[in-house]
Amino acid sequence: MNRHERRKANRRLPKIVVTSEVYELTGKGGKPISLNVGPMRLWAEKHAERGTIPIEFDYIERLLKDGAVKEDRVQAILRTQNPKPVLLCRAINDDGDEIVDGNHTYVALGLAWSLAHRDGTAPEGIAPRARAYVFQPKDWRRFVIPTSHKVGKS
């Protein structure tokens, strides 16, 4: 099949548009980073270190104050019996680590723990934690989207 025949055949095929959630942040030294979190979660389910991370209420307050999480999504997660683990990238920016997927889950777990603590049903002496897939730099770097590949950005 020559080039002309190949092009003609391809015109008949439906166009496939692949979309994925992209998380954008400011990395070390102020450099912008975009991560392709859809494939990141799929990879994590098979390969990433799974553990827990501490719930930091100052971070939750900041997410709520900045409008980074939506109340309706947090409420929906509170009704979920088994929310997905958050995705945490180690040493990704000047502050150190950052949750790149699962901020709503993180907030919901913090609120649930606060309510349990208020009601006296939280276990004594145990700090609140969230399940997480933890990405070391060598792992999260494979999901960085080069700026030349970003669509719709100027």
Image: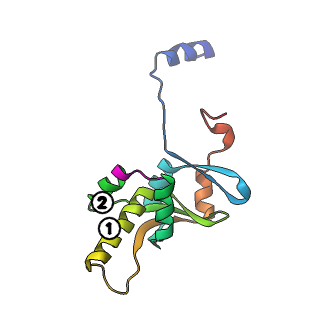
Instruction: Using residue 139 as the reference point, say whether residue 110 is left or right of it.
Output: left
**Near-viewer residue (107 or 36):** 107
Instruction: Using residue 77 as the reference point, say whether residue 63 is left or right of it.
Output: right
**Residue drawn at 45 percent across, 71 percent down:** 55
Q: Mark 2 — residue? A: 78
Mainly helix, strand or loop, the magenta region? loop
Whether 114 is drawn above or below 26: the answer is below
| Neighbourhood count class around disc 2 (C-alpha, 10 Å): few under 14, some 14–19, many 20 upward | some
Label 2 to label 1: alpha-carbon separation: 7 Å
Instruction: Using residue 125 as the reference point, say whether residue 61 is left or right of it.
Output: right
Task: Check disc 2 and give the amino acid type.
Answer: Leu
Whether 15 is drawn above or below 87: the answer is above
Q: Judging from the image, what secondary structure is the residue with disc 2 in? A: helix
**Quarter holding the N terminus?**
top right
Task: Check disc 1 and give the amino acid type.
Answer: Ala
| Neighbourhood count class around disc 1 (C-alpha, 10 Å): few under 14, some 14–19, many 20 upward | some
Magenta residues span 68-72
Q: Is residue 132 magenta?
A: no
**Residue drawn at 26 percent across, 62 percent down:** 81
Q: Mark 1 — residue? A: 112
Q: Position of residue 56 (x, y in %)?
A: 48, 71
* Marked residue nearer the N-terminal end (2 or 1): 2
**Near-viewer residue (5 or 116):** 116
**Quarter holding the C terminus?**
top right
**Residue drawn at 57 percent across, 16 percent down:** 7
Q: Position of residue 42 (x, y in %)?
A: 45, 53
**Near-viewer residue (79 or 135):** 79
Residue 126: in sight, yes or no? yes
Residue 102: in sight, yes or no? no
Q: Position of residue 45 (x, y in %)?
A: 43, 59
| CB atoms of marks 2 and 1 within 8 Å | yes
